Every structure is written in C-alpha cells, then in structure tokens.
Image: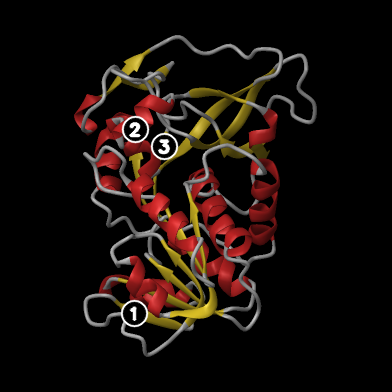
Amino acid sequence: MKAIIQERFGPPDVLRLADTDRPQAGADQVLVRVHAAALNPYDWHMMRGDPFVARLMGVGLTRPKSRVAGIDAAGRVEAVGANVRGLRPGDEVMGFCPGSFAEYALTTADLLVPKPAGLTFEQAAAVPMGAVTALRGIRTAGQAQAGQRVLVNGAAGGVGTFAVQIAAALDAEVTGVCSARNVDLVRSLGAAHVVDYSREDFTDGRVHYDVILDNVGNRPLSRLRQVLTPAGILVANGGGSPGRFFGAMGSMLRLIAVNAFVRQRLRPILPAAPAGRTHEDLLAVTAFIEAGKLTPVVDRTYPLADTADGVRHVEQGHARGKAVVTMP
C-alpha cells in the first residue's frame, strides 16, 4: 500500500510517500480502507516529537515509534478480526485510526462509529479529534448550559468551528474570537457575537463569560480570569509552539496549581486522542451531525503525496476549519 513514512523527528520534510506492507487485522482489530484522513496539530507535534517530554512518555525517544502518522480517518471496513462484533466489510465508518496517512490502517471497533450518510468521506474524516475535543471542552469540562455566555478563542480553527456549533446547539450565547477574514464564517456557525482579535481585546473586561474555551493560549491566565464570572469555568485546550521541552504541559500544570486556590474552575484538556469515553463521545458528535446541528468545515484537501504540505499549513496555525488528506 501507499503510505506517508517518517523515519526521524523533524519538520514536514521528514515525511515521504512510500510503498509499505498492508497491515493485517488481529483477532480484536479492524482494518479500514482509508478514503480520507484529517490533519491535526496533534500530527505535527508527533512529527517533531514536540514537546520533548512527550518522547519520554511513549512517542519515541530518538525516532518515532510509529513510522506512519495520522489519527483521524473515514473509510470502509476492509476486514475484521475473529473477536470483533458489530462491524463487517463494506461498512462506512469514521473514527480514530492510528497510521491513517495510508491507504489502510488498523484500529479497534470501539474507536469507530458509522459514517453519517449526509457527510462525504472528506467531511467525516474532519470530525473525530476536532469534534470530540470540542465536545469535551464545551459540554464535559465546560458544562455549558442554555442561556450561559460562552466564549471560544480560536473559533475558526479545527476545534473552534465545532465548539461554536456545539455551544450554540446547547442554546448558549456564543462569542467567537477569530481573525477578520473568518468573522462571517464564525457567525454562520451560530456565534451571536464575533470578536476580531486584530481590532478588539476580548479580555478588556467589558463582558464576562460563564465558560471560556481557549484553543490558542495567547492570553495570560490572569487576563482570562478577569473576564470569567466568579464561578465560571475556563477550559484550556493543549497546544504550544514547536521546540519546547514541556510545551503546553507547563501551562497545564500552572492552571492546575492556580485552580486549587480560586473559586473559578480552571480545567485543562488535551487533544482527544483515543482514551476514556471515546466511543460514547463519537456517538454524541454523530447525534449532533444527524440532527443538523453540527457540520464539519473543511478548509482544503491534499492528495496523499502532498501530506507534508498539509502538515505545514496546519502547523502555521491559520487553518480555517480542518485540512484533509485524500487517498489515491
């Protein structure tokens, strides 16, 4: 099969298209014929082995433990292991498939859900990590309720576009923070108010919010707390720039430390890599989609051979919604 191979940590140039063996499904595994795979900040972090501390936690110390990157995918079930129930070859699915920058990828049944009929494979591939992270940020950690004021910083990004829609679906009063070129997009997703960060400072104290989902990390914690209601919830979504030893983990630790001494609730979340309630969260996201309350925003698509260009675009931090890789 064709796959994007990575032999060492580094910039997007370390990614190359190559022929490699097609994986075989074990007894508890599902082999998916990948039709499309989303590009996430998670992918460039794994590509670079960044932050460095992640290498000590299983990513690989001197080289990537996994030669094929990618995590989000949509496609058709190619084969199932003897112990797998509920899936059969030909089923259209979306979910988390480690090694999804390839024509075939292995996963497990609990990391897959049926692809909504109304979505293309490209749209469906854009859903898993972005939408599940947004769901956890807005509904699980943020506990957003009808009538509350919810602010999403980074509202036009891969997580933000889903977060605005989920908060609006929960009947919250949503404010989205984005660049000037994305104001109309964010408003169309359900934001009642849109802040152009180049012209306004949402931390100026004129408005206070019950829930803040910060996908950017470009404002000091003290400023964010100033615009949070006394019992409000701040959810910080992990990110960070390349080349740091701890990266966003340092900010997360500070958030946890401050949380112990204040009435406001300060909650870090990490990108929704497979863990915990992943299957239930994927089903919840699917329910929003099928109810017409959630639609993926696909910024642009790249053929598999141009995956490095797609990762470079996402790493620059100005993607509008999600970028997606399509298979030959």
Q: Which residue is labeled 2 in the image? A: 53
| Residue displayed at 78% across by 17% down | 83
**198 left or right of 169?**
left
Label 1 packing within 10 angstroms: few (<14), some (14-19), many (20+): many
Residue placed under numbered mark 3 in the picture: 326
Q: Is residue 216 above or below residue 273?
A: below
Q: Earlier in the sequence, mark 3 or mark 1?
A: 1
In primary-sequence order, the first of circles 3 and 2 is: 2
Quadrant location of the N terminus in the rendered image:
top left
In front of the other: 262 or 225: 262
Which quadrant is home to the C terminus? top left
Q: Position of residue 188 (x, y in %)?
A: 46, 75
Please tell me which residue lies in front, 231 or 109: 231
For label 1, the SS is: loop
Residue 202 is marked as: 1
Image spot of residue 150 (x, y percent): 51, 76
Q: Mark 3 or mark 1: which is in front? A: 1
Q: Position of residue 95 (x, y in %)?
A: 59, 39
Name which residue type carries label 2. Val
The amino acid marked with disc number 1 is Phe
What label does residue 77 carry, if any?
A: none
- Residue at the spot 62% in from the left edge and 71% down from the top edge: 169
Q: Distance of mark 3 from mark 2, alpha carbons?
A: 32 Å
